[in-house]
Amino acid sequence: VGVAQILDGRAGMREALDGARARTLGLVAHLSDEDLERVVDPIMSPIAWDLGHIAAYEDLWIAHRLGGLDMLRPDLAALYDAFETPRAVRGDLEFLRGAELLAYLEAVRARTVAVTARDGATDLHELVLRHELQHTETMLQTMVLGGLPLPDGCGVPAPVAGRDDDWIALPAAEFLMGAGPDGFAYDNERPRHLVSLAAFRIARRPVTNATWLTFTEGGGYERRPWWSHEAWMWKEEYDIGDCPEGVRTGDPDAPVVHVSWFEADAFARWAGARLPTEAEWERAATWDLDPMDGPGQVWEWTASAFLAYPGFRAYPYREYSEPFFGDRYRVLRGGSCATHPRVAGPTFRNWDLPQRRQLFAGLRLATDHEPTNPTSGRTG
Ligand code: AVJ
Ligand code: FE
């Protein structure tokens, strides 16, 4: 690697960090201080907490761990540590607000710039950059839950071309799943390993609002047979009697969004299909003979629980992935209209609880066999 390339790497990273910051601040510019500071829902942080957390995370990894400097505000470390301070209690904290919050974001960034000029751009920069970009999506989810207006052009999936009965047929194969050893990837995407898959089919496009409405209007939310026991209990407890509002108000050809895993699983059964496993999803997304279409408008729920790949090693810290492994969380693949492209990729694994509806998540169907009962057949 020559000097010119190193300097280019620094300049490129600086630009990417600046771009992420402009995006972050742009997303919240229309909100009042009160909206930034309030708890809109116990499952989300106040948006101002996310903003301070972005800066604290950056200072920890770049100025402190990489640059060897003392933390700018060691007194804030516990407050902004996601594990020490669970979401439900974040509203009660003395997190930074207003001008003090903005000044903290700026001061941390100035330290980052100084350390980067000296030490160059590293994988830790990529971690910090993607962390900020991931939190911009989290903040948009908070706005959805709180009924706050979304900034223009954010969070509304665009229509997708195609038909429901168009399936990609993949033959049985062994394929290499996960990220290779080079370049940045999250710990949970590694190591790359061989997976055997039986033949399967996967829909070329995600399920649309129009198709979901057919499910809803055909009694999808009232009739028991398509729902798992756990899903039905959730539906009863939280009185989920209807599809998300956007199914009716959104573009009929846009992918359905804000459905939970429980609903996606029930829908798939109704459609005579199932959710793809994450291995199937990744194989279809990386298959060069007939790849799935384009960048995602919605995250896609998969059938898979969030588990460690064989040989997993935590990097750069245990809490990024490891505490979430197990059968509680489900994997989402792809990326949404609220996801920055730098975050998403064919090996990226997102995860959340099966009851969550605030995610920009929909689904794509899969089957083991020639589909005999395509969803389009149900519309008559
Ligand atoms: C990968 C989106 C599930 O938000 O919990 C943010 C990303 N990790 N800060 C999350 C993350 C630490 C993570 N998800
Ligand atoms: Fe975080």
Image (spheres, helix red, strand yellow):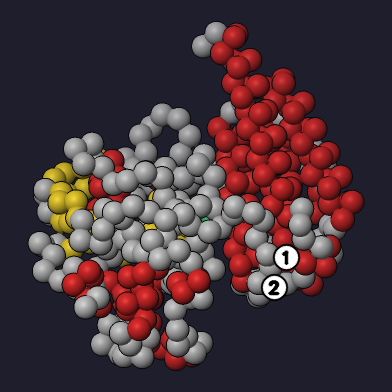
Q: Which mark is residue 130?
A: none
Specify whether tag 2 is near ligand 1 (CB below 8 Å): no
Callout 2: helix, strand or loop? loop
| Residue at (82% x, 67% y) in the render | 34
Of 81 and 199, nearer the camera is: 199
Residue 202 screen position, x and y as percent: 22, 56
* Quadrant of the snapshot with the C terminus: bottom left
Q: Is residue 37 visible?
A: no
Residue 44 screen position, x and y as percent: 64, 68
Tell me the distance, in whole angstroms, between the alpha carbons under discs 2 and 1: 7 Å
Q: Residues within 10 Å of mark 1 (few under 14, many from 20)?
A: many
Q: Quadrant of residue 227?
A: bottom left
Residue 40 screen position, x and y as percent: 70, 73
Horizontal side, residue 340 vs residue 331: left or right: right
Q: Amino acid at mark 2?
A: Val
Q: Amino acid at mark 1?
A: Pro
Q: Residues within 10 Å of mark 2 (few under 14, many from 20)?
A: many
| Residue at (45% x, 84% y) in the render | 242
Q: How many marks?
A: 2
Q: Which residue is mark 2?
A: 40
Horizontal side, residue 107 vs residue 176: left or right: right
Q: Is residue 312 visible?
A: yes
Q: Which mark is residue 46?
A: 1
Write down which quadrant ligand 1 falls in: bottom right
- The first of marks 2 and 1 along the sequence is 2
Q: Is residue 365 above or below residue 177?
A: below
Q: Is residue 78 above or below residue 122?
A: below
Q: Cβ–Cβ below 8 Å for labels 2 and 1? A: yes
| Residue at (48% x, 67% y) in the render | 250
Horizontal side, residue 335 vs residue 106: left or right: left
